[in-house]
Image: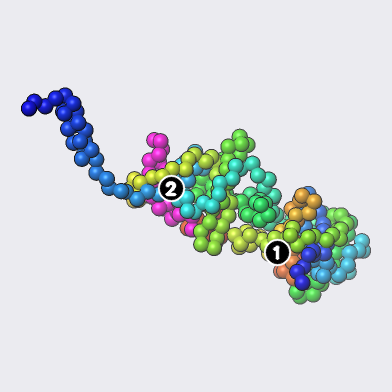
Amino acid sequence: MALLSVPLVLLCHQGQYFAFETVQVRRQTQTAPTEREQACSFAQLLDPCAADAGGAAQWLELAGAEGHIWLALDSAADLIQLAAADIYPLPALLHSRRDLLALRALGFYQGALVSVLDARALPRLAREPNA
Amino acid sequence: MHETPLDQLLAEQKSQQQDIVDVDEPVIKLVIFSLAEQHFAFPSTAIKEVLQGDESVFFVPGMPASVEGVINIRGDIESVITLHALLQLPTSTEKNMGLTSILLARANDMHSGLRVDRLLDVVDVAQNLIQPPPDAFPEHLRLYVTGLLEFTGQVVAVLDIEALLSAWQKGQG
């Protein structure tokens, strides 16, 4: 039976939309994790050199390939259902040049582009927050 | 019998026709465009479609600067890249003037939209008018240029789409 839609956890960062599959998200909480070595801010995920702004509004606990990862978010993430027809594999040329190794697919949600990330590719990107 | 003026005219025309040698020269259709005030061309076989250039391009985070984004074309998405960096050309400002186009290019299993500053023409050109690049041709262009021709007084460099996309895929530009 063909998959009609995919449940995603959608988050917005600096005007750009990103999402993880819900099966890769263990929980969302406002409580900072105690295991800081497994945590990074979303800004640092995109750019390891980015400064940690601190004061995360939400934390996502993700199921990575090598254990769980905590991701600090500026704002709360939403649960959405994205139609399969609105999800596309990353074009081959872009896949070969992507800096964000976790970038797996692209989708369109309410007219905006959503970068669908794979939590299993995150451990190599995770950095200890500067704070 | 004296030759009449008409006889003479027809004889001259016949002579002129015989002077025209039908070489049946093979032609190649080229898509000619400009990038940073320089003229380039792709064989039309490399270009699947030419878009007007005003399509909505969605920014994709985590990509090199030469990636403009992706476009949605009739239900499929396609990357849009610029070749300025790969060809070591200055970034153009023509996009703001609404003159640009997007060429949907393909080579083997690679394909992408290419932002060009201006689509100039699509013409049939005799292949013998395309000359190989001279020895003094810039090294960084030699990798991608298969030939040169003159078009409306300008030198046009014919580009190898496969070489370009392969180099870009490998991290250049």
Name the foreground residue: B133 vs B72: B72
Q: CA distance from mark 1 to mark 2?
A: 38 Å
Disc 1: host chain: A
Name the spot of residue A19 as percent of width and height, x first.
Answer: 79, 60
- Residue occupied by mark 1: A104
The number of numbered discs placed on residues in the rendered structure image is 2
Using a 10 Å C-alpha cutoff, classify the residue at mark 1 as few (fewer than 14 neighbours), some (14 to 19) or many (20 or more).
some
In the picture provided, is A107 more to the left or to the right than B126? right
The structure residue drawn at horizontal position 68% and vertical position 62%, both measured from the top left corner, is A89
The structure residue drawn at horizontal position 75% and vertical position 54%, both measured from the top left corner, is A108
- Residue occupied by mark 2: B29
SS type, badge 2: strand
Q: Which residues are magenta?
A: B139-162
Name the foreground residue: A16 vs B111: B111
Q: Quadrant of the N terminus of chain B?
A: top left
Name the spot of residue B84 as percent of width and height, x first.
Answer: 54, 47
Quadrant of residue A43 in the image?
bottom right
In the picture provided, is A131 more to the left or to the right than B161? right
Name the foreground residue: A43 vs A127: A43
